[in-house]
Amino acid sequence: MLLNCDLGERASSDGLEIDAAVMPFIDQASIACGFHAGDPLTMQRTLALAAQHGVAVGAHPAYHDREGFGRRSLQLGAEDIAAHLHYQIGALAGIASSMGLCLSYVKPHGALYHDMMQQPTVRRAILETIATLHPPLTLMLQSNAAADALQAEASTAGVNLCFEAFADRRYDDNGKLLPREEPGAILAGEAMLAQVEQLAESSSVTSVSGRVLDLRVDTLCVHGDNPEAVRAIAAIRSRIERD
């Protein structure tokens, strides 16, 4: 089970230092492409850090919403979604190519990720866009009870999938993430590590009501936006390697 983290979202020196601290513990870096966060220099610096640590890199595109950090749905049509993705992925891919690097996957950010999981038309637009990229890239998306159907949909479009689970989020009984505003939605400490261990050992999570849910998991999303989160990622890596 790989570890992935969203990076390149803070242009400050403190942000770069945190990203640098995260890199030794992860396998995949999802790098902001400028629409919700990031800028050309931050992309370049984050790519360099990934190269230094042998971390695979992916594009982390979003709706064009820097003010809302990409967390607001813009209700775009398929043509606009394709243009948004081509612009952002192309920008990051161009910088990566100049450094001798290649992107390996795409992971939508924020509201675009949520809309992809909830709205078939958005997901179809994303799949069809990724299918046009050369070389082809894998789409990272949330694992849930519909994983087989999602895989069939992606295969029809000619796109490979990478299913992710979340280390620090509680799941509801349908395999969806419990809304952040609900009590117990965010896991920390031993509760988070226990979920990581369960995912590593049996590819399952225990829902908020105690149901054991089987998940198809290729990669585990971890969050590293502050020093405490970096320490949590180090503990997660240690727990996975121990198992």
Image (cartoon, rainbow, N blue to C red):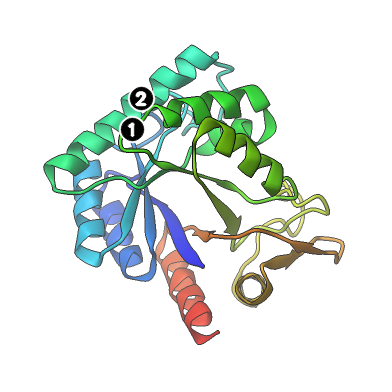
Residue 94 pos. (x, y %): 20, 34
Mark carried by residue 30: none
Q: Is residue 34 visible?
A: no
Q: Nearer the viewer, residue 120 or 169?
A: 120
The residue under label 2 is which amino acid type?
A: His
- 173 relative to 229, above or below: above
At a point 64% along the width and 77% down the height, the residue shown is 201
Asked if disc 2 and disc 1 are in contact, CB closer than 8 Å, the reply is yes
In this rendering, position of residue 186 left or right of residue 15: right
Task: Please identify the quadrant where the C terminus is shown.
Answer: bottom right
Disc 1: which residue: 89
The answer to which quarter of the image holds residue 28 is: bottom left
In this rendering, position of residue 46 left or right of residue 168: left
Residue 60 pos. (x, y %): 41, 40
Q: Dot 2, crowdedness within 10 Å: few (<14), some or many (≥20)?
A: some
At a point 51% along the width and 68% down the height, the residue shown is 1
Mark carried by residue 86: 2
